Each structure stands twice: as C-alpha cells, then as structure tokens.
Amino acid sequence: MTEILEKTEQSYKGDHDRPLGGYAGILSAYGGTVGVATVAALLAGRRLPDHVGVMDLLLMAACTHKVSRRLAKDPVTSPLRAPFTQYEGPGGPSEVQEKPRGALGELLACPFCLAQWVATGYAAGLVLAPRVTRLVGATMTAVAISDWLQLAYAKLMKSAE
C-alpha cells in the first residue's frame, strides 16, 4: 500500500514539490476536528439551527475573511507560522509575504486555505456557543470594516496630494 501511495504522489507532483502526504494529514485533521465538534454538540444536547440568518451569514463571512487574513498574513501572528514558512518581505498593507515550507506551511500562509477552517469553527461556535460566537464575529467584522476604511482614507489622502 505504501508503495502505491508513493508512486501516486510521485506521478502527481512530477518535477514540483507537492506534499500529498501532508495534505492527507491536514484533511484528516480537518475531518477529525469536525467529528469532535459534532460529538461535543451531541453531548451538550445542541441541535443544528433550522436556518442561518442573513446577519449571521454576513458576520460569518466578514469574520472569516478577517481572521483568515490575520492568521495568514499579519506580522504579529508570524511566530505561529515561522516553523512552517520563510519570511520573504512585506506584503500588502500591514501584511507580510512568506514562502510556505511543506503542506502545513501552505495552509498557514494562505488566507483562502485557512478560511475553510475559520468558517467551520464559526459554524461550530454558532451551535455550541452562539452568543460568544456572534460577539467575536461582530468584533472581527468591525476590524475588517475598519481596515477597508483605513485603506479608503489613505487612497483619498493620496489622491488629494
């Protein structure tokens, strides 16, 4: 079985560095996390909501955007990524650019990749602790809106010069 998996990985990646084994580990961890959250909800007697309202969806979307960017690009969270990435230089405003090392590095340096994890955590939070989750969502949404206002302000100031 190991030989089949190694041949599959080698023929998939060709001349590129694609850590399929690491990706499989990340997928397993994600599935395990969802399983643990499901068991926790069942043990706590929590039920899934009948629907997700528009306000919850908007908070979830904005919070997911901000938290995933904060985890993947913020200079302050770089110690969390440092074992799995290599600093390359500044990125966007108040962000860094890092080169991933391995599958976990790709996950941690990619806000698009982290968004799945963050949104799943938010969804679990809506089931297990909805009031706290909505407060965190509102807080991070306010931060995201503030970021956009800061960027708009800077652009206006630059155009006024």
Image (cartoon, rainbow, N blue to C red):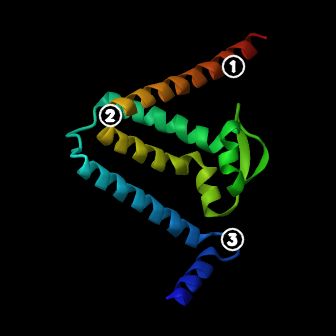
Badge 2 or badge 1: first in the primary sequence = 2
Secondary structure state at the residue bearing disc 3: loop
Quickly name the residue at label 2.
Answer: 130
Which residue matches tag 3? 16
Q: Residues within 10 Å of mark 2 (few under 14, many from 20)?
A: some
Q: Nearer the viewer, mark 2 or mark 1?
A: 2
Image position of 104 with respect to 20: above or below: above
The front one of 20 and 132 is: 132
Whole-percent x, y for residue 4 in the image: 52, 87
Label 3: how many residues lie within 10 Å, few (<14), some (14-19) or many (20+)?
few
Q: Residue at x 24, y 51 (%)?
A: 42
The three-letter code of the residue at mark 1 reads Lys
Q: Nearer the viewer, mark 3 or mark 2?
A: 2
- Percent of width and height locating residue 61: 43, 36
Q: x%, y% of residue 97?
A: 73, 45
Residue at the image position 69 percent from the left and 37 percent from the top: 76
Residue 155's mark?
Answer: 1
Q: CA distance from mark 2 to mark 1?
A: 37 Å
* Residue 13 falls in image quadrant: bottom right
Q: Secondary structure at mark 1?
A: helix
